[in-house]
Amino acid sequence: MAVYTPVSADELANFLAGYDLGALVSCKGIAEGVENSNYLVETTGGRFILTLYEKRVAADDLPWFLALIGHLAAKGLPVPGPVLDRQGRALQTLNGRPACLIHFAPGVSVTEASPDTCHAVGAALGAMHQAVADFGQVRANSLGPTSWPVLAARCTGRLAEIDQALPALVTAGLAAAADWPTGLPIATIHADLFPDNVLLLDGRVTGLIDFYFACTDVRAYDYAVTHAAWCFSADGRHHHADRASALFTGYTSALALSAAEIAALPVLGQGAALRFTLTRAYDWLNTPQGAMVTRKDPMAFARRLAWYAAATSKAMTGG
Amino acid sequence: MAVYTPVSADELANFLAGYDLGALVSCKGIAEGVENSNYLVETTGGRFILTLYEKRVAADDLPWFLALIGHLAAKGLPVPGPVLDRQGRALQTLNGRPACLIHFAPGVSVTEASPDTCHAVGAALGAMHQAVADFGQVRANSLGPTSWPVLAARCTGRLAEIDQALPALVTAGLAAAADWPTGLPIATIHADLFPDNVLLLDGRVTGLIDFYFACTDVRAYDYAVTHAAWCFSADGRHHHADRASALFTGYTSALALSAAEIAALPVLGQGAALRFTLTRAYDWLNTPQGAMVTRKDPMAFARRLAWYAAATSKAMTGG
């Protein structure tokens, strides 16, 4: 949510000299993305997002991320892909940081999702899962099920500082995730398809962005993450059945879910809710006082976790 | 340097419905300006900066600021002016904040100024001082000479925490400013024309922005502030005579400086350097530990203060 590494006009002009994009017209630091420095750059040749990767994104993973968005963009999906320099390279170094120029996508993120939006998002997710069928590169999910007991242990004894109900909810979630489904289709998944990471225009998805949690994992888990992100009120107190139904219809218009995947949705939902409960709880407990960062409430996802524990597949798909 | 007040897509679409600017295409929070929330907004009708004014800008002063930039834009200066809604209003309220939509200006800010850039900036400042001749509205300078002893007193006893040399430099600066020149021409001045607040393209000034320190004060003081901002190395250790000469030639190509104004430049320079030394020192001493704000070094301007104390008008104008 901030610009960490400054880039001067001279440095940027020098950087752009490696591309066939014309001359610099404008550059604004933008508040977007996980924890990187992002600039909206305009040249006489178009508009682009310049990202300088700060320490939270592992530099070794960048070629994988850039190959993925390049693959999806080349398939015609609404995924802004990397721009290649004259030597055909996407990944650069700028001011000591790994950096990449990415195409600009129009559209805005919604905060409150309508069923129509959920239908469009479901269809875009299904199309993405289709398009990665021939993306051969693999990346492990560093925030997958095996990480959750570790994450929980790192919050040990302090979850009750956030909410008295939280320790029991996490314990139940870990127990449920210990019985994680096996044999379901594996794919490249976005793993973080929240409203912030979807750009929309006139009800149409114009951009799927921020693939920096993408990885190779259970495909229907990505559906469950997306359900958790779009089908509840922000505080997690209310599940919206109409959105869930629309998300399902949208997704399955692009890609079928098998009976085994549908049966697994409640436990996958528990896993998804647990993952965001735990990372938010960890950040909550470890954000220094006075830091100008908005802490996200872990309870918003702990409430979803409780919902999924009692949910049926039917409630998640509106079937 | 951050977005403080979020604006959702729905809120923005509703806000834009009051204007004849077409439909929303894109919106990015940008890291720009003093301490306001800024968004780069694109509609089917063009591009705009949406500013939500946070508490540091006095709401009562906003009509004056907006009238000023509207006046300058109407005169054809490279100043992005406010956009009026269908009722002819510039100033709005959005999410509980005073807000305004301002035209977008292309161009980028430079960090290291060349003499050619200083010439262009001087000419733009002179043209601005010309263009305000018939701007009748007055605003007192809340950071003018009478405020400096007050600001210094608020840092009392703590200036040496920043640098052992600072207390004596400030004392000397206050003594010099006590003999402030009288009878010089008064005008509407920008009062903060630092490189951050000038957009350039191909050596041409395309935007003078961030008028939120503008006020009615000694016109040549604005020249001195601009000299302090553009004619030294960032750390204040080196004065660049070639930049000073170019700034002077540029300014006087648009507007003459009288003999009295030129004679006063060293003391006006001391005042300008003192003003930024004091506000930076106050912010330095009062920025909480851990706040994600870059503290600007007061010594960079204390060194300029020492330079001005020994300077001649000739050294400031390259004459």
Image (cartoon, coloured by chain):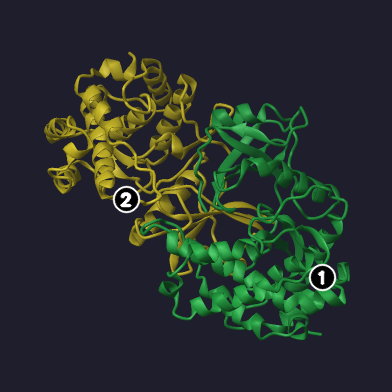
Chain colours: A green, B yellow
Name the amino acid, label 2: Gln
User: What's the residue at 71%, 53% (across, down)?
Assistant: A140
Q: Residue A42's mark?
A: none
User: What's the residue at 69%, 53% (across, down)?
Assistant: A211
Check the image and report above or below for B119 versus B10: above
Closest to the observer, B124 or B25: B25
Q: Position of residue B43 (x, y in %)?
A: 66, 57
Image quarter hosting the C terminus of chain B = top left
Secondary element at image label 1:
helix
Q: Chain of mark 1?
A: A
Q: Position of residue A122 (x, y in %)?
A: 78, 69
Q: Which residue is mark 1?
A: A251
Secondary element at image label 2:
loop
- Location of residue B267 by image quarter: top left
Check the image and report above or below for B298 versus A221: above
User: Does mark 1 fall on the same chain as mark 2?
Assistant: no
Q: Chain of mark 2?
A: B
Q: Position of residue B11 (x, y in %)?
A: 57, 69
Give the spatial CA distance, label 2 vs label 1. 48 Å
Around disc 1, counting alpha carbons within 10 Å, would you say few (fewer than 14), some (14 to 19), or many (20 or more)? many
Does the rendering let one see residue B92?
no
Left or right of B17 on screen, residue B304 = left
User: What's the residue at 60%, 47% (across, down)?
Assistant: A57
Q: Which residue is mark 2?
A: B289
